[in-house]
Image: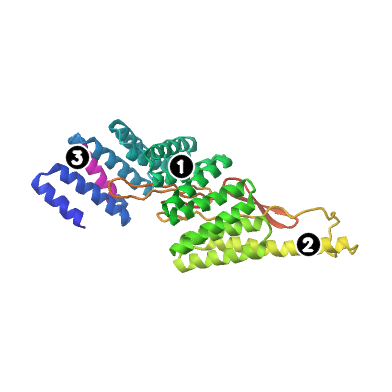
Amino acid sequence: MSYQQDLIICRELGERHGESRALNSLGVALQQVQRFDDAIAAHQQDLVTCRELAEHHGEGQALNNLGTALQQVQRFDEAIEAHQQAACCFAELGDRHREGQALNNLGTALQQVRRFDEAIDAHQQASARFAELGDHDGEGRALNNLGTALQQVRRFDEAIDAHQQAAVRFAELGDHDGEGRALNNLGTAMQQVRRFDEAIEAHQQAAARFTELGDGEGEGRALNNLGMALQQVRRFDEAIEAHQQAAARFAELGDDEGRVLNNLGTALQSRGLWRVRKGRNQSEVKGQPDARSDGKGPGERLMPLVVDVPAVSAASAAQSSAEFTACSEAVALAPADEAATTQTDLHAENKRWGRRRRLLDPVLSDDLQ
């Protein structure tokens, strides 16, 4: 890497400030190629150098970048401490923009260890900093992350508002990627309050944004969530098509499409059960009891369906359904941020009409930027 050469030259010349800049840039570059342990070492060296030079601005940058690298290797407690120190450094210097970035990254780390109330506070502060500066991109990121944290504590109406605001900010900037993520998360929040028609529209729009960008992974996530919402309103044929398309996108990328296929299977099973149920009710209405009747009245309805949305992010693999997945991307000098997705905790129970599952926790779909 050219940054390594710069570092060698600066050290030979005894140029400590240049050495710090080279270490910071090297650490960011190493994060981008997923050499996270090496990146951590570079940022730690940079931190030591900045403190020796009493270079507080560089110290804040080193801490913030160190925190993003630590998140990538799941050293979340250390990442939290790094982002907290970074936010303090920038606050003391009056650098509101980088303070906002550090606070937003702090929120993603706090979500990883399920400290959601603290994460909400961090994302709210970050959003306020960016709003003061008129930074719509940063504000959109913070709002989207805020929405995911709010979903985790079941404050769905507030989450919906946060994701809607985020989608507007990204749309104003023409950022279709950010808009797609915000819309996808908006759809999952709306599903939690049973606003399924609006959720369907949000996921459809999200899928369209990702299609425009050629982002097969994002499109797959949005299509899978769309299928989930369609199942809830018993539009099974459309749900099956959405899950099939989602599975195809993940297969093209070489990703594990197992959970999507599981959702597809659920949609196929539910469609069959629903058709049997409808046929039986129609027979009973005509006064012709169906041979499969169990003596229950025609008012009995099909119970809620299974929904299982995979947690997929650009920087980390999907984890188990009980885990929360979040990460941050490094950007030169001041890494950006973004919380990613979570996965619902699903419990299966056997019922007369087959295998029925109910949602116990929020379903968050994506995100990480």
Amino acid identity at mark 3: Thr
Q: CA distance from mark 2 to mark 1?
A: 44 Å
Quarter holding the N terminus is bottom left
Q: Secondary structure at mark 3?
A: helix
| Residue 78 appears in the figure | no
Q: Please state which amino acid type lies under the numbered disc 2.
A: Lys
Residue type, label 1? Gln
For label 1, the residue is 111
84 up-or-down from 219: above or below: above
- Residues 267 and 135: in front is 135
Residue 180: percent from the left, percent from the top?
48, 55
Residue 23 position within the rendered picture, expressed as x and y whole percent measured from the top left: 21, 47
Q: Residue at x 41, y 42 (%)?
A: 109
The residues bearing labels 3 and 1 have C-alpha atoms spaced at a distance of 30 Å
Residue 184 among those drawn in magenta: no
Report the side of 185 relative to 74 (left or right).
Answer: right
Q: Is residue 340 above or below residue 227?
A: above
Alpha-carbon span between mark 2 and mark 3: 72 Å
Specify start and end residues of the magenta stretch as a single range. 38-50
Q: Residues within 10 Å of mark 2 (few under 14, many from 20)?
A: some
Q: What number is the disc on residue 278?
A: 2
Q: Which mark is residue 200?
A: none
Which residue does the numbered mark 3 point to in the structure image?
49
Give percent across and percent down for residue 323: 50, 48
Please rate how many residues cluster around mark 1, counting C-alpha atoms within 10 Å: few if below 14, some from 14 to 19, many from 20: many
What's the residue at 58%, 58% (across, down)? 226
Q: Report the mark closest to the observer, 2 or 1.
A: 2
Seen in the image, is 332 located left or right of residue 196? left
Q: Secondary structure at mark 2?
A: helix
